[in-house]
Every structure is written in structure tokens, then in C-alpha cells.
Amino acid sequence: MTVISTLDPRLHAYDPVRRAAERTLEGRLEGADWQWLTPEAGWAGNARLSLRAEPNWEAAQVSEALPGEALSVLLREGEWAWIKTGPDGYPGWVRAAGLLGGLPAGEVLKLTALRAHAYARPKISSPILAELCFEAAVVRGGGESVTEGGRVWWPVLLPDGAAAWVQAVCFAAVPEGDAADFALRFLETPYVWGGRSAWGLDCSGLSQLAYAAFGRALPRDADLQQQELTAVDVAQRGDLAFFPGHVGVMLDGRRMIHANATHMRVTVETFEEGEYGTRLQDTCTGFGRWTA
């Protein structure tokens, strides 16, 4: 039988204090007093959902669920719910009020813009109903598109079913390029611990999004991403560079873009250039390359 300490709580949802665990772990945890949880389907609402390490606002944010994102709901406890995010299966506690039981019927549209707003009417001066982001999901609404001032607006339904309008350009295909090109679009984005969007993100959130733009699914955290990729000695464009608790996307053999708390934003650094670049070079634990 697997000893509980060998399971990674970022990949396996189990709580030794509550003696609750996802049902897929049945038979793998010691003891007979576990409550085995069968997940329910859920979705994030119109706003990003903050995942907390514990069901209280003073606990650290560990990740985010994006608007309209599919989730697995494991346990409800008062105003909180224990969930796993859909894309990477990352567990955490969210406010239950931010969860939905389903999305409206219709064609699901994924945002390709880094940041976008949903408006009450097809006019940029109308009230903003929601903040959206890359990979957020809405549903195509009924009716025709509207052209206003040279702008094309699409009617959409927000995750909770509210009618809104989003400019069509926010759903345009991701420009051709690579993970490094996409990461550069986040330059100067604020650093937010546990953030997964262009409204604020952390180091592994940036690398995860940069790879996701080209259909490459990575785990949530830096060390898990390092395990997922093939180790290489010499970096090339698009590789990930790893450090203790940190990750960046290489632009070439020496330059790296990363979300960092040193500058509190996404910046580009050059290995061995200046104090910070020298520190990065000295603490780099290796490079990883997507070879799948």
C-alpha cells in the first residue's frame, strides 16, 4: 500500500486532517476511516476563482480557475468548496458562490486575447460586465454580430448565462510563433502568486500559458513542469529554465522571460548580466524541452 507521504497533494486531493480524499485514491491511503469523495462537475463563474490552500481568505492562493473553466467539485464546507481545476487537476479551496452547475447551452468560445472585457452593449462606452482572459470560456449568444465604428461585436452568454458583447478580435486565432513569442506578449504583466492570467500571474503560470497556446499541456508548478519535460544541457528558444521554486521561458541561449517577485512583473533577463542575471545563472538547475 502506498504511504500517504509519497503522494503529492498538488496532484492528488487528500486531506489527512479531514480524512477526506478523492475516490481515485481508494486503496492507496493507510487507514480505514477515509471519506471517499466522488467529484461533481462544476464550472467557474464569470470571474476568476482564487484557489486557497485552506478554506479561509488568510490562506495562500495556490492557483486560479479561469472564467467558464470546467472543474471537479470534491467537497463543500460552509461557504467554501474543495475543487480540482480541469486543465491540470490542481486542488484547492474556492468560494462556493463562485461555482456554477453548468454553462449555458450553445457553442463554447475560448478567449485568445490576453485580457478582454465583456460589455453590456456592443459599444466600448457601455458598462463592463466581466473581466475575461486567455483560455476563459463563454458561449456564443443568439442573434447576429454587430459592426460599430469599424469594430465587430459578437453576442455571447457569460458562464452564468448573462447576455453580453465581446469584440470578435478577442477570439482571433493565436498568432503563429512559439512559446517564447507568446510569453513575450505578457511582458510587464504584474506578478501575482498563484495567478494564471494576464491580469496577474506567477512564474509557472506564465510558462503553462505559453505552452498551452500551442496545445502543450504542462502541470501547474515549476518542479512538476521540470519533471514533465526532457532535460537538456544547452538551452534553445522555447525551452524552460528551472531554478529552486522558479521557472522561465528561454528566448535564446542566454535570455529568459519570466514572471518574478524581484521586479513584481514579467521581465526579460540575460544570464550572467548584472547582479540578477548572475544570480540566475548560478542558481539554474537545468533546462527542459518539449519533445512529445
Image (cartoon, rainbow, N blue to C red):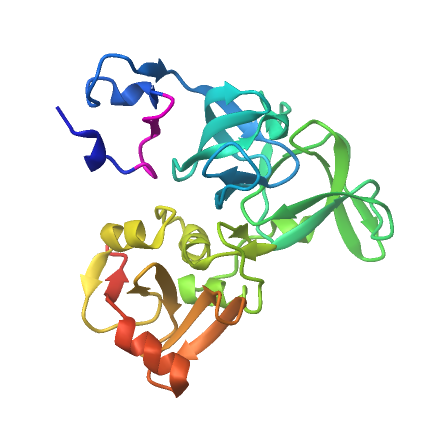
- In the drawing, does residue 49 fall left or right of residue 155? left
| Relative depth, front residue between 239 and 39 | 39
Residue 205 screen position, x and y as percent: 45, 53
- In the drawing, does residue 53 fall left or right of residue 107? left
Q: Residue at x 54, y 45 (%)?
A: 135
Answer yes or no: is residue 237 visible. yes
Residue 185 screen position, x and y as percent: 54, 65
Q: Residue at x 66, y 34 (%)?
A: 140
| Relative depth, front residue between 205 and 125 | 205
Residue 2 screen position, x and y as percent: 15, 28
* Range drawn in magenta: 9-18
Q: Quadrant of residue 37?
A: top left
Looking at the image, is 268 positioned above or below residue 62?
below
Answer yes or no: is residue 178 visible. no
- In the drawing, does residue 40 fall left or right of residue 248? right
**Magenta segment: does it hold 16?**
yes
Q: Quadrant of residue 113?
A: bottom right
